[in-house]
Amino acid sequence: MRIAVLNGSPKGMTSITMQYVLFLQKKLPQHQFTILHVCQDIKRLEEDATAFAEVLRAVESADAVLWAFPLYVLLVHAHYKRFIELIFERGAQAAFQEKYTAALSTSIHFFDHTAHAYLHGICDDLDMRFVGSYSAAMYDLLEEDERRRLLAFAEAFLRAVEERGPTQKQFFPVAGDPISYQPGPTPVKLSTGGKKVIVVTDADDPQENLGRMTEKLRACFSDPVEVVNLHQIAIRNGCQGCIQCGLDIVCIYRQADEVYATYQ
């Protein structure tokens, strides 16, 4: 059986998550695992249509898809989310439709369920057959009982694929007509009481809903309010998972972009 593994770590093969995948690959040699570094290679996938098409072909030719990822502050890495956005932006849903799928995460077990619910919802939107999810702690692979439990999950997943087992969607698609926000009058403006207020926004068009809401919020104060637009500051890249910040509270990009200065 062919399994396409969508690697959601910016660290590629050196990530903890991939060690779990390599363990399954070693224990299940009768199956072919194709690991696709969609998170680490997101810039190339955005800019190179051929590279993105290669990922789609790997998914199309697979019998099953495994979403394998670490947790980054309660959810998947931003580059993983960007890959998912590309699927919908480029109308590539057909490559995923009806594919059996499961999710495997590694973390410190802090709100894992939010990330798994998110991935389950994405799979439902893609009309995939979601079998289940497995949440591993960072060092579970060192414990015999946990290795046995992980292997049992993988075998159950592959058995469901082989037997075309029943699956059930859990999340309904988002429905409803888009609205156009039109700000009303502000009868009474609020004083900041001498405090400094900053509004952080990622509105890329001041005339669209979020842009109008941001301006309305700023106008609700009688004192000057600073607006920081994330589209207008230099952000070199997403988190690389190097954990340098855990050593000295300094990001490796500190001198390379404007994120740290904006944060200060």
Image (tube, grey):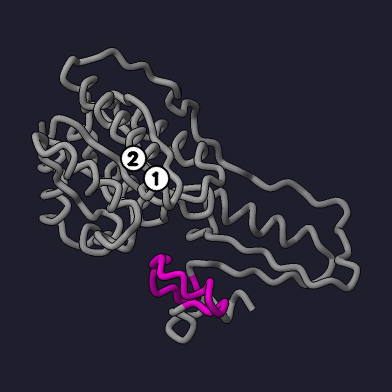
Residue type at tag 1: Glu
Where in the figure is residue 64, as x and y percent of width and height?
Answer: 19, 31
143 on left or right of 200: left
For image coordinates 23% across by 39% down, the residue present is 91
Residue type at tag 2: Arg
Residue 143, label in figure: 1
Residue stretch rendered in magenta on the structure = 232-251
Please tell me whether residue 238 belongs to the stretch shown in magenta: yes
Above or below, 128 relative to 35 = above
Residue 59 falls in image quadrant: top left
Above or below, 160 relative to 145 = above
Q: Nearer the viewer, residue 233 or 58?
A: 58
For image coordinates 35% across by 51% down, the residue present is 80
Where in the figure is residue 112, as x and y percent of width and height?
Answer: 50, 41
How far apart are labels 1 and 2 at the CA level? 6 Å
Question: How many residues crowd mark 2 within 10 Å: few (<14), some (14–19), many (20+)?
Answer: some
Quarter holding the N terminus is: top left
Label 2 sits on residue: 147
